[in-house]
Image (tube, coloured by chain):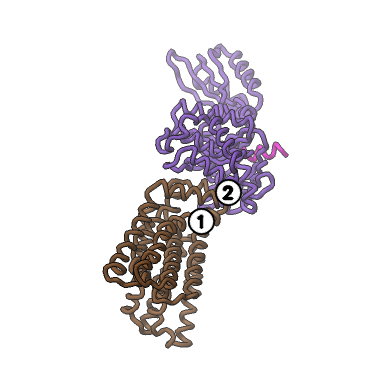
């Protein structure tokens, strides 16, 4: 794992990736603090972060697109498979390297509240609480990015899908206000989501039976729910969209609440997507 | 050292490797021979843990490559068909990464890197970016990578493909040299290459084992001459009737030559070839026509290879061999 970590760090800091990522993040957060803290003279640093998290939509996919897709393209994944290193170690090493690249600019950012507190009254606990949540948000998005990169050998495709997924996640709360909250609307939407998930499973596992089983079980569950309590479906879709939003959890911290469930949520997302990445890498051995 | 047991790999309906079993002993150079698409790469990928088998297993010194990948993989150095190189790095950086991943640290790592650089003769290019290296050098860096960690078995997948003749000779020399200190398995679809470098040939076609023996013995066993060519001044009909009286002869084809001579190609059903030529000689002696030329046609591995890969013939050979062993 250490070898993979070192190697990845070496690659990031030799190429422009780490610097471009850091520069974008710093520029965006810097812009935010200029607008909020300096021009508007607001003393809350957390608003800057809530403004700055939009930058993840672009920089996370750019950072993560190559992480596994490139290995596949250059066939260097064969080296990783033949080395006495497990796929879990490979994914963890790669993920930790990405976190390091992300943490570096974040360390600089975490100095901002201290600077501002020299010139005014900054409430530091909420500032650092949100910086911590900001870190977790980024870490979770990077885990999603790693998984997307593991699905394809085309970096551009990985980046495109990554941007689409994170953008959708960013706007899912605003979108949820527009989607139908009726029981029928939720039912149709849930069916579509189940079909989409089954398609993804079909693509990842290349097994029809698994995809069908998944589809049938979820559809049956949905039918039972529908039959037992139609009322439960009402407003279910907007609720799910809100619940799935990684950004929405972050705004809780911005509003000054140190939300333990949020932390658990982020960590679960990280573990879940890293697990999927390991499976995706492992699966390639079977095809 | 390595035992491959009833290995089968299917891609959907397509069977790439079909119930393949063989044993590899320590200290030999094995040539893994077969045409493109015979299942060589698939087998090698499974042996090195890069690919899973549909059924069957591979034991490396008693360690199942899938059950205990770590100890098994430490015994193997693998160079896949396309050398797995990070183009933006220098060979030195690349080897350092691979060495670390193989568990080497500190001085031992430095020492082994120096050693494999010497062995593969990449001293001059170790500081250049891999993307700037020629294909021959890239192949060497790939081999250097496989040598790190002092594995007992080196597996090379088509190491000479795409190289120019001089590079091919150099890589062959390198393989021979490695064979002195390691067990080497390398695949190729070029017969002469395998014939010159290997102690043992593993021949596969359509995912099945076709033959497994020393090159010399293989030739002797499978390629005893069974064809006689002759030139005579007898007519086609007379020749046919003379030869058809000899029971060992299975077929005769004749073609006229300039000057009224006749060329006949005779296939025998095997057995003592000289006994057949004696009979032919005696048959002609009894007439007023003479044999002007008679030669035994020796097949070579190349012919065998082509024949085996054309289909069915292969199975009988492998089965024949198994029966021999019994």
Q: Which residue is mark 1?
A: A91
**Chain letter for the residue marked with disc 2 in the picture:** B
Q: Is residue B320 inside the magenta stretch?
A: yes
Q: Is residue B258 visible?
A: yes
Boundaries of the magenta span:
B313-326
Q: Position of residue B15 (x, y in %)?
A: 53, 50
Q: Position of residue B137 (x, y in %)?
A: 46, 33
Image colour assigned to chain A:
brown
Q: Residue furthest right?
A: B326
Image colour assigned to chain B:
purple
> Could you tell me which residue is drawn at 35 percent across and 53 percent down?
A20
Q: Which mark is residue B49?
A: 2
A267 over B117 or under it: above or below: below
> Could you tell me which residue is drawn at 48 percent across and 29 percent down?
B168
Q: Which mark is residue B246?
A: none
Q: Main secondary structure of the magenta part?
A: helix
Category of crowding for the residue at label 1, using alpha-carbon neighbours closer than 10 angstroms: few (below 14), some (14–19), many (at least 20): many
Q: Is residue A167 visible?
A: no
Quarter residue B205 falls in:
top right
A84 over B318 or under it: above or below: below
Nearest the camera: B218 or A200?
Answer: A200
> Could you tell me which residue is drawn at 37 percent across and 52 percent down?
A19
Label 2 to label 1, Cα distance in Å?
Answer: 17 Å
């Amino acid at each position: 794992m250490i070898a993979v970590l070192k190697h990845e760090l070496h690659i990031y800091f030799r190429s422009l990736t780490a610097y471009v990522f850091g520069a974008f993040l710093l520029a965006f957060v810097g812009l935010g603090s200029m607008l909020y803290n300096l021009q508007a003279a607001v003393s809350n640093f957390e608003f800057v972060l809530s403004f700055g998290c939009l930058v993840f939509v672009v920089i996370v996919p750019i950072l993560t697109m190559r992480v596994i897709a490139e290995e596949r393209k250059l066939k260097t994944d064969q080296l990783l498979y033949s080395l006495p290193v497990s796929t879990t170690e490979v994914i963890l090493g790669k993920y930790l390297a990405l976190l390091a690249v992300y943490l570096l600019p974040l360390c600089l950012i975490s100095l901002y509240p201290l600077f501002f507190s020299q010139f005014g009254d900054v409430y530091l606990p909420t500032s650092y609480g949100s910086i911590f949540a900001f870190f977790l948000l980024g870490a979770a998005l990077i885990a999603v990015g790693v998984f997307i990169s593991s699905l394809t050998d085309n970096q551009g495709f990985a980046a495109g899908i990554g941007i689409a997924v994170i953008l959708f996640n960013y706007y899912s709360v605003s979108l949820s206000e527009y989607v139908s909250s009726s029981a029928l609307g939720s039912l149709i939407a849930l069916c579509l989501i189940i079909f989409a998930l089954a398609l993804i499973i079909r693509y990842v596992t290349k097994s029809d039976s698994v995809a069908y089983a998944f589809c049938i079980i979820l559809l049956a569950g949905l039918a039972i729910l529908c039959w037992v309590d139609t009322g439960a479906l009402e407003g279910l879709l907007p609720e799910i969209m809100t619940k799935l939003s990684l950004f929405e959890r972050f705004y809780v911290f911005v509003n000054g609440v140190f939300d333990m469930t949020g932390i658990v949520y982020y960590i679960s997302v990280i573990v879940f997507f890293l697990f999927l990445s390991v499976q995706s890498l492992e699966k390639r051995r079977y095809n | 050292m390595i035992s491959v047991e009833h290995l089968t790999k299917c891609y959907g309906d397509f069977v790439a490797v079909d119930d393949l079993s063989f044993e590899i002993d320590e200290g030999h150079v094995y040539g893994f021979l077969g045409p493109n698409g015979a299942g060589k790469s698939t087998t090698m990928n499974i042996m090195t843990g890069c690919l899973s088998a549909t059924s069957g297993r591979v034991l490396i010194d008693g360690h199942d490559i899938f059950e205990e990948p770590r100890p098994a993989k430490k015994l193997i150095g693998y160079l896949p068909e396309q050398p797995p190189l990070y183009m933006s790095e220098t060979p030195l950086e690349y080897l350092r990464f691979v060495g670390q991943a193989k568990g080497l640290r500190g001085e031992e790592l430095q020492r082994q890197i120096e050693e494999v650089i010497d062995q593969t003769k990449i001293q001059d290019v170790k500081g250049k970016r891999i993307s700037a290296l020629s294909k021959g050098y890239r192949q060497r860096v790939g081999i250097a990578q496989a040598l790190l960690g002092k594995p007992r078995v080196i597996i090379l997948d088509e190491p000479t493909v795409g190289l120019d003749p001089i590079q091919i000779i150099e890589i062959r020399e390198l393989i021979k040299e490695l064979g002195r200190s390691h067990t080497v398995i390398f695949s190729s679809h070029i017969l002469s290459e395998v014939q010159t470098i290997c102690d043992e040939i593993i021949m596969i076609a359509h995912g099945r084992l076709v033959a497994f023996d020393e090159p010399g013995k293989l030739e002797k066993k499978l390629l005893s001459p069974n064809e006689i060519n002759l030139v005579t001044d007898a007519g086609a009909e007379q020749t046919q009737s003379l030869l058809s009286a000899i029971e060992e002869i299975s077929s005769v084809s004749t073609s006229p030559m300039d000057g009224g001579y006749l060329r006949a190609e005779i296939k025998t059903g095997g057995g003592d070839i000289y006994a057949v030529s004696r009979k032919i000689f005696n048959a002609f002696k009894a007439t007023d026509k003479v044999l002007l030329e008679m030669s035994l046609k020796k097949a070579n591995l190349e012919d065998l290879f082509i024949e085996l890969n054309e289909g069915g013939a292969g199975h009988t050979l492998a089965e024949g061999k198994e029966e021999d062993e019994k």
